[in-house]
């Protein structure tokens, strides 16, 4: 809609208004409409993802709609890559919004239209104060240790007093007496004295709307009934309510969610794990259902339930379960939860995810091998990185390069024992885990060593590392020919 004409914008508004009004049922009860409204100045961060999740769950729980608005009015910092990262992150987490995403900047004329309507109905006024006057006002307030707020110097003046053609902004004529109480559905009743608020700018001198105005107009036009967002926006609610009231619009219900802190109780930062959602997926190998489940439990609970499916979350979620205190982000807990979801995941899906992380393209037979290996590999992995590293031995070329730990396992009499194991395994007819374990046990008993002592040099020869899935699973996955060849490669000391 960038570059849309005024007529097109008017038609668009008519469509939105019709949809908003028609959303009311015959009983007069409005269905729930929530929204997630990120600014595309960076990635989709953890706090934003949780806010989107809570909005989606509340809407779905009540049979309503979950909408998405991209607040791209900051033209300097808003970027297309950031927009794409936000949309990609939401889709990856399964946070599917209803309808098309709305771009706030494209609706600037509609926002300005509302500011002019407020000017006409006496709830706003033109302010001709210059930048120099405002800076002098703030300097005086600082000197007198007063709050820095606009003093209303043009609130009751006639605009004819301004120089001809002087630029002006449109300011809200905010109430000055009394107080406002918001019955916040998370924080409870919150009251602010009107004297603490000033006459904020609605429309800048260049005709562009401010954030506060744009948010209210968009929420109204989109039919939003519940504004669920971080509690860092709580003060904004008191600044935005006068716009609703000036226009005679229904006010939304508010629910301000406490922010996420680090495990140490400090404000969440990158050192705590405040990364983009894409980093959890790409760099840390977290599954979307694990991250979604973890975010759900950050500040909301349902008894002692820890593992909660999306279907259960929709059934159980309500704002009464959201706590008032900041929740603490614990990366270890997320990794533990992710391990659970990896163990529960479909093997074919995991094979596809791991294959995409390997530095080469798998053949059809290699991909089938990877899929068959998942049952043995996934119990040991907490994330897709570990799963990929654990699967790498399946595709290594001979002779294997041993790491330091594996080389140490082949010192002393280990290679002689390896030769005896090679002979015993070569004689196995049915190459399955039961027959393979029986053969290795026999060699261990004949050699007078424990089973683990026989398995360790085998692991070094077959995998090239000290750790691997169960050694009999490794033998079965590699197959007779490859297993015997890898063992033979390590039976003699390299020159």
Image: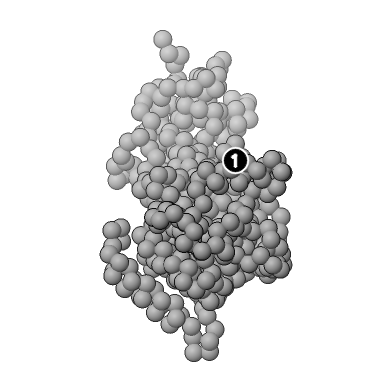
> Which residue is painted at 58% across and 59% down in the image?
199
Question: In x, y percent, where is residue 121?
Answer: 49, 73
Looking at the image, which is closer to me, 262 or 343?
262
Question: In x, y percent, where is residue 392?
Answer: 42, 35
Q: Is residue 278 left or right of residue 55?
A: left
Looking at the image, which is closer to me, 127 or 342?
127
Identify the residue position indicated by label 1 in the image.
269
Residue 278 seen anywhere in this rendered image of the structure: no
Looking at the image, which is closer to me, 426 or 479?
479
Q: Is residue 31 left or right of residue 77?
A: right
> Quick one: which residue is furthest to the bottom in this view?
26
> Which residue is painted at 58% across and 56% down in the image?
153
Residue 151 seen anywhere in this rendered image of the structure: yes
In this rendering, the answer to whether 461 lies above or below 94 is above
In this rendering, the answer to whether 45 lies above or below 489 is below
In this rendering, the answer to whether 313 lies above or below 432 is below
> Which residue is painted at 35% across and 45% down in the image?
367
Which corner quadrant holds the C terminus? top left
- Looking at the rendered structure, the secondary structure element under dot 1 is loop
Looking at the image, which is closer to me, 66 or 375?
66
Q: For residue 314, which quarter of the picture?
A: bottom right
> Quick one: which residue is furthest to the top in this view?
495
Q: Which colour assignment does the render follow?
A: one colour
Question: In x, y percent, where is residue 195?
Answer: 69, 61
> Which residue is painted at 41% across and 76% down in the image?
17
């Amino acid at each position: 809609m960038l570059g849309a004409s005024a007529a097109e914008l008017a038609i668009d508004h008519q469509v939105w208004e019709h949809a908003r009004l028609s959303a009311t049922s015959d009983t007069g009860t409005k269905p729930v409409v929530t929204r997630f409204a990120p600014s595309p100045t960076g990635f989709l961060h953890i706090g934003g993802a949780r806010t989107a999740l809570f909005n989606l769950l509340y809407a779905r729980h009540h049979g309503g709609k979950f909408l998405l608005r991209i607040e791209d009015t900051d033209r300097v910092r808003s970027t297309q890559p950031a927009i794409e990262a936000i949309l990609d992150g939401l889709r990856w987490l399964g946070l599917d919004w209803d309808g098309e995403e709305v771009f706030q900047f494209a609706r600037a004329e509609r926002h300005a239209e509302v500011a002019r309507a407020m000017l006409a109905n006496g709830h706003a006024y033109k302010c001709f104060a210059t930048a120099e006057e405002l800076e002098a006002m703030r300097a005086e307030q600082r000197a007198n240790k007063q709050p820095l707020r606009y003093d209303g110097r043009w609130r009751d003046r006639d605009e004819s007093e301004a120089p001809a053609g002087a630029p002006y902004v449109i300011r809200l004529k905010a109430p000055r007496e009394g107080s406002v109480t918001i019955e916040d559905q998370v924080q409870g009743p919150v009251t602010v004295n009107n004297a603490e608020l000033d006459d904020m700018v609605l429309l800048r001198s260049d005709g562009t709307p401010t954030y506060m105005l744009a948010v209210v107009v968009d929420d109204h036009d989109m039919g939003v009934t519940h504004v669920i967002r971080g509690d860092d926006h709580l003060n904004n609610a008191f600044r935005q309510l006068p716009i609703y009231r000036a226009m005679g619009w229904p006010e939304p219900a508010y629910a301000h969610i406490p922010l996420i802190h680090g495990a140490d109780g400090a404000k969440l930062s990158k050192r705590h794990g405040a990364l983009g959602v894409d980093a959890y997926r790409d760099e840390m190998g977290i599954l979307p259902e694990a991250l979604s489940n973890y975010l759900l439990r950050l500040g909301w609970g349902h008894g002692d339930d820890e593992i909660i499916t999306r279907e259960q979350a929709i059934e159980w979620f309500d704002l009464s379960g959201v706590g008032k205190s900041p929740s603490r982000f614990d990366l270890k807990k997320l990794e533990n939860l992710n391990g659970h979801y990896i163990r529960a995941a479909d093997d074919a899906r995991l094979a596809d995810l791991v294959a995409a992380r390997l530095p080469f393209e798998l053949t059809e037979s290699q991909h089938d091998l990877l899929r068959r290996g998942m049952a043995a590999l996934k119990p040991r992995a907490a994330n897709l990185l570990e799963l990929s590293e654990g699967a790498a031995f399946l595709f290594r070329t001979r002779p294997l390069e041993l790491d330091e730990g594996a080389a140490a396992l082949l010192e002393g009499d280990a290679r002689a024992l390896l030769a005896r194991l090679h002979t015993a395994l070569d004689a196995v007819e049915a190459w399955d885990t039961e027959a393979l374990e029986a053969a290795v046990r026999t060699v261990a008993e004949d050699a007078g060593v424990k089973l683990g002592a026989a398995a360790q040099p085998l692991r070094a020869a077959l995998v090239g590392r000290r750790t691997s899935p169960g050694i009999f699973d490794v033998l079965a996955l590699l197959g007779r020919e490859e297993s015997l060849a890898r063992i033979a490669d390590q039976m003699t000391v390299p020159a």
